[in-house]
Image: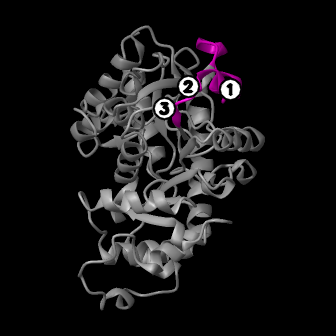
């Protein structure tokens, strides 16, 4: 069903540097919290979880978790939710299942690598939908529906998107996104929307509806890791009104995680119950950090061109220095312990991702210290 997969460039880079770096300027998750703080936010105590047994849980996820997930949606119910061990497992099995017999898929670019490599390793043919027009200083992030329609074929089975987008922070407007969902549904195409950054948009009015609420065939993928800042829970899910698809995915999950830990499903349900408070906290961190980054980059107009994200906690600024973003990123981590992601880690087999960029993150409270370290590094470079 799925052939050989290449190295996951971004995760390989993180494996080498994420826990060795003194400063992360590229974290893709919002600020985390410990168990005590999470429980206190929810008006609970550690004693409330002391009696949880460590046995198996239903493959679909506990009813408590699925109810808590469904409460975030307008149309989706708890019976429309299947829990996974993070979003990565969900995306892997979802794309593998939808494309197991071939057909055609359209994938937005740039993307989180597995969203294109899993389709490419399947029997399907795959086309890339660039999320930009123009180049260099004239580049603009956009979702061009005419360009999408031009890529569709009679055998197109999947359109896979990610909004807010990683690495750009781009979010289309509501009308465009709704039109996308209906274009796919009318043609019998499954819209797969990776929504892991949804909920911490600086302007909440830009927050898109869940894809799974818009049509009976659309699929939403989400996780506790990114906008909630709780990656250690390893709880993700697929939501869709297509219950036959969920049943097939459950049988695929039997080959990997089987079920999630009951303790982390319980903690995830608690966190979802105070999700608005967590999002408000993380949105405030992101908003403040965007201001700091904008001011920092303004001090180096010959090196950086910055555009704040519309949503999520990452963006993809230009690096203007003569050595390019690859050398910049390598020197920053090796000489100053500041971790970024150069554009090469987002290279795509489907479209030429702009190479003059690097990914940064805004979700951590440690960002002021990170910027100080980067400033020292830049000031110490030979002129």
Rendered view: 158 above or below 80: above
Instruction: Give the number of the disc on residue 105.
Output: 3
Indicate the quadrant where residue 73 lies.
Answer: bottom right
Left or right for 201, reference 107: right
* Quarter occupied by the N terminus: top left
Q: Given this view, does label 3 or label 2 mark the residue nearer the observer? A: 3
- Which region of the structure is painted magenta? 133-157
Indicate the quadrant where residue 98 lies.
Answer: top left
Instruction: Give the number of the disc on residue 31.
Output: none
Contact between labelled residues 2 and 3, with CB atoms less than 8 Å apart: no
Q: Residue at x 35, y 86 (%)?
A: 49
Q: Write down the residue under mark 1.
A: 144
Find residue 219 and report its horizontal and vertical position in percent: 54, 52
Left or right for 288, reference 377: right
| Disc 1 element | loop
* Quarter occupied by the C terminus: top left
Find residue 129 and report its horizontal and vertical position in percent: 56, 25
Whether residue 223 is visible here, answered yes or no, is no
Q: Write down the residue under mark 2.
A: 129
Q: Residue at x 40, y 53 (%)?
A: 87
| Label tally | 3
Circle 2 crowding by C-alpha within 10 Å: few under 14, some 14–19, many from 20:
many
Q: Nearer the viewer, residue 276 or 376?
A: 276
In magenta stretch: residue 223: no
């Amino acid at each position: 069903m799925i052939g050989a997969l290449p190295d996951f460039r971004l995760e390989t880079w993180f494996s080498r540097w994420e826990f060795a770096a003194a400063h992360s300027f590229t974290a893709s998750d919002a600020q985390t919290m410990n168990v005590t703080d999470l429980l206190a936010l929810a008006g609970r105590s550690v004693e409330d979880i002391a009696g949880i047994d460590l046995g198996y849980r239903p493959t679909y996820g506990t009813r408590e978790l699925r109810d808590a997930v469904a409460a975030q949606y307008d149309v989706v119910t708890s019976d429309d939710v299947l829990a996974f061990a993070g979003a990565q497992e969900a995306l892997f099995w979802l794309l593998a299942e939808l494309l197991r017999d071939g057909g055609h898929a359209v994938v937005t670019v740039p993307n989180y690598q597995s969203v294109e490599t899993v389709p490419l390793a399947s029997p399907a043919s795959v086309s890339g939908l660039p999320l930009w027009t123009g180049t260099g200083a004239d580049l603009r992030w956009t979702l061009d529906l005419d360009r999408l329609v031009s890529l569709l074929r009679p055998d197109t089975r999947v359109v896979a998107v990610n909004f807010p987008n990683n690495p750009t922070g781009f979010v289309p407007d509501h009308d465009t996104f709704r039109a996308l969902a209906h274009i796919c549904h009318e043609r019998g195409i499954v819209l797969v929307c990776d929504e892991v950054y949804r909920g911490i948009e600086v302007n909440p009015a830009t927050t898109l509806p869940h894809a799974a609420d818009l049509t009976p065939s659309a699929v939403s993928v989400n996780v506790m890791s990114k906008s909630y800042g709780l990656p250690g829970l390893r709880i993700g899910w697929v939501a869709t009104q297509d219950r036959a698809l969920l049943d097939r995915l459950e049988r695929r999950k039997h080959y990997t995680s089987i079920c999630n830990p009951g303790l982390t499903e319980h903690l995830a349900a608690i966190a979802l119950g105070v999700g608005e408070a967590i999002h408000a906290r993380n949105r405030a961190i992101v908003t403040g950090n965007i201001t700091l980054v904008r001011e920092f980059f303004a001090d180096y107009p010959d090196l950086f061109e910055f555009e704040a994200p519309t949503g999520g906690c990452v963006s993809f600024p230009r690096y203007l220095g003569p050595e390019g973003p690859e050398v910049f990123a390598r020197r920053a981590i090796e000489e100053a312990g500041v971790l970024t992601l150069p554009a090469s880690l987002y290279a795509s087999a489907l479209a030429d991702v702009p190479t003059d960029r690097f990914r940064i993150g805004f979700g951590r409270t440690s960002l002021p210290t990170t910027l100080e370290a980067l400033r020292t590094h830049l000031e110490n470079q030979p002129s």
